[in-house]
């Protein structure tokens, strides 16, 4: 009889626990739509602060606003100081002198420093490979190259094209965009804060093709330009909200908070920052008592070298980080990406089945990307996950058009609901056996997904033997 009563008691307790768990999920999802405050927080940052490249006063003010808003909702927020190398774009100009004068829509590459006025003849080096210079005299000339992919599928990173032009003794390099749309955003000269040795500018596809046509017709082209950009080591901040669990082992929800130097950074990465804010509110209100610790981090300086996540990793290297969930330009959730860390697949597949109110039709995918903050973690063996989003090709990437009117309140609610549920489930699932990979394992992992070559070329692979 006692055994029967004990079994009944355990069954009832299990039902109550399941019911309580379901109730929490309902509260998280419901409040994400009914009480969402992140849209207005992002509006304030976009409209009252604008672009927030790490190092400028707008970035500092945006950090203040984010902290103020987090404190209003009672989230346990603190600043974590970092000392990165910031790039200050300054004032620059690039002007065609012949066959007639025309100011180009041109922006220097990051890590471009001060170069007083320079002028010279333009020569076209096609895709910028060494072989493209075979019959080309680039010495003391200004080299024009395209960022388009050549027919054989090879491609050069802009930083590689800059280095090759320098090796051929070019005076400067101009890189024209790979797609139409009058876009001319800054591209990375490198990710390590090393000053470029020659001026490097980026111009739109349309202006680049115009110059190419002139040169192919034998019409001489000359340009003049200057830049007073500079690099400086600064003191900046990551913004961190920590929800302590019953154990210190933790999951990190990360996004970058800085933006490129134009537009308002509304989608890149105001969207991820806003969703992280909303997840903070939801967890703080409905789900802050968990088994594992949850840390939400707004990384600074992603756009100029993943600085915030690199510095975070340096400081927290010895902590037990179970996984990092990265949100960069998030929209309406379409599914989840394991990045090949498939110990999380059963949980993610269950969520796809159970979250019937969301269009998670992409299911659970398995790819490994580069050029965002999750790189700082997976290259050192820490599992990373990503949210797959429904979104059209974004036409305003790093451009003036990346403004608040382009983002969707509905998407914020959908993403916040799904991500808060994901974080809650991760923080309370004690059956997932995850671990930090060693050098051999992460090398095999990155080889499987074909990202090592790119990371090496970007000087972002830590296992090269010096």
Image: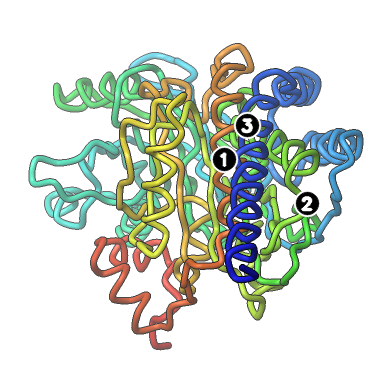
Label of residue 247 in the image: none
Q: Position of residue 307 (x, y in %)?
A: 63, 58
Frontmost of labels 2 and 3 is 3
* Viewer can see residue 260: no
Q: Position of residue 302 (x, y in %)?
A: 59, 49
- In primary-sequence order, the first of circles 1 and 3 is 3
Q: Residue 39, relative to residue 232: is it above or below?
A: above
Q: Nearer the viewer, residue 420 or 45?
A: 420
Spatial separation of the CA atoms under disc 2 and disc 3: 23 Å
Q: Residue 183, how many percent across, how many down?
A: 42, 23
Residue 26 numbered tag = 3
Q: Quadrant of residue 261?
A: top right
Q: Which of the marked residues, 2 or 3, is nearer the chain's N terminus?
A: 3
Q: Which mark is residue 419?
A: 1
Q: Callout 1: 10 Å neighbours few (<14), some, many (20+)?
A: many
79 versus 263 height, above or below = below
- Rendered position, 167 above or below 109: below
- Tell whether 84 sits left or right of 394: right
Quickly name the residue at label 2.
Answer: 241
The quarter in which the N terminus is drawn is bottom right
**Neighbourhood count class around disc 2 (C-alpha, 10 Å): few under 14, some 14–19, many 20 upward:** many
Q: Residues within 10 Å of mark 3 (few under 14, many from 20)?
A: some
Instruction: Name the residue rendered at 26%, 22% in the picture.
Output: 209
Q: Quadrant of the C terminus?
A: bottom left
Helix, strand or loop under label 3? helix
Residue at (34%, 36%) from the top-left corner? 121
Q: Mark 1 and mark 2: span between their CA atoms?
A: 15 Å
Residue 171 appearing in the image: yes
Tell me whether the residue at label 1 lies in contact with that at label 3, contact meaning CB atoms closer than 8 angstroms. no
Q: From the top left corner, tell me how far across and down residue 255 is, in percent.
A: 61, 45
């Amino acid at each position: 009889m006692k055994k029967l009563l004990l079994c009944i008691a355990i069954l009832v307790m299990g039902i109550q626990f399941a019911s309580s768990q379901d109730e929490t999920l309902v509260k998280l999802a419901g409040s994400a739509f009914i009480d969402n405050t992140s849209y207005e927080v992002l509006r304030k940052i976009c409209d009252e602060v604008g672009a927030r490249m790490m190092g400028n006063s707008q970035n500092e003010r945006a950090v203040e606003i984010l902290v103020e808003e987090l404190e209003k909702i009672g989230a346990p927020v603190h600043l974590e100081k970092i000392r990165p190398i910031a790039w200050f774009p300054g004032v620059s100009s690039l002007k065609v002198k012949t066959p007639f004068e025309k100011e180009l829509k041109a922006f220097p590459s990051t890590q471009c420093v001060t170069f007083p006025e320079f002028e010279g003849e333009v020569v076209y080096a096609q895709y910028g490979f060494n072989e493209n210079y075979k019959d080309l005299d680039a010495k003391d000339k200004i080299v024009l190259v395209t960022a388009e992919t050549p027919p054989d599928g090879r491609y050069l990173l802009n930083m590689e094209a800059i280095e090759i032009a320098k090796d051929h003794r070019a005076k400067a390099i101009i890189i024209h965009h790979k797609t139409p749309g009058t876009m001319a955003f800054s591209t990375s000269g490198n990710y390590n804060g090393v000053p470029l040795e020659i001026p490097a500018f980026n111009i739109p596809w349309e202006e680049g093709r115009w110059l190419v046509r002139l040169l192919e017709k034998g019409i001489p082209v000359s340009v003049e330009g200057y830049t007073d950009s500079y690099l400086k080591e600064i003191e900046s901040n990551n913004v961190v909200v920590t929800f302590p669990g019953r154990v210190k082992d933790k999951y990190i929800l990360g996004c970058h908070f800085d933006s490129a130097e134009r537009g308002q950074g509304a989608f890149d990465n105001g969207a991820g920052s806003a969703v992280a804010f909303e997840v903070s509110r939801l967890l703080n209100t409905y789900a802050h008592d968990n088994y594992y610790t949850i840390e939400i981090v707004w990384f600074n300086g992603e756009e100029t070298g993943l600085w915030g996540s690199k510095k975070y990793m340096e400081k927290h290297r010895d902590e037990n980080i179970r996984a990092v969930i990265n949100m960069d330009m998030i929209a309406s959730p379409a599914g989840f990406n394991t990045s090949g860390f498939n110990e999380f697949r059963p949980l993610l597949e269950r969520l796809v089945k159970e979250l019937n109110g969301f269009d998670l039709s992409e299911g659970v995918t398995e790819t490994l990307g580069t050029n965002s903050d999750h790189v700082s973690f997976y290259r050192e063996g820490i599992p990373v996950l990503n949210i797959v989003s429904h979104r059209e090709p974004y036409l305003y990437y790093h451009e003036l058009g990346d403004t608040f009117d382009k983002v969707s309140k509905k998407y914020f609610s959908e993403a916040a609901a799904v991500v808060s549920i994901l974080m809650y489930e991760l923080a309370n699932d004690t059956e997932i056996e995850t671990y930090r990979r060693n050098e051999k394992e992460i090398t095999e992992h990155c080889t499987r997904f074909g990202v090592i070559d790119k990371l090496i070329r970007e000087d972002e692979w830590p296992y090269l033997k010096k």
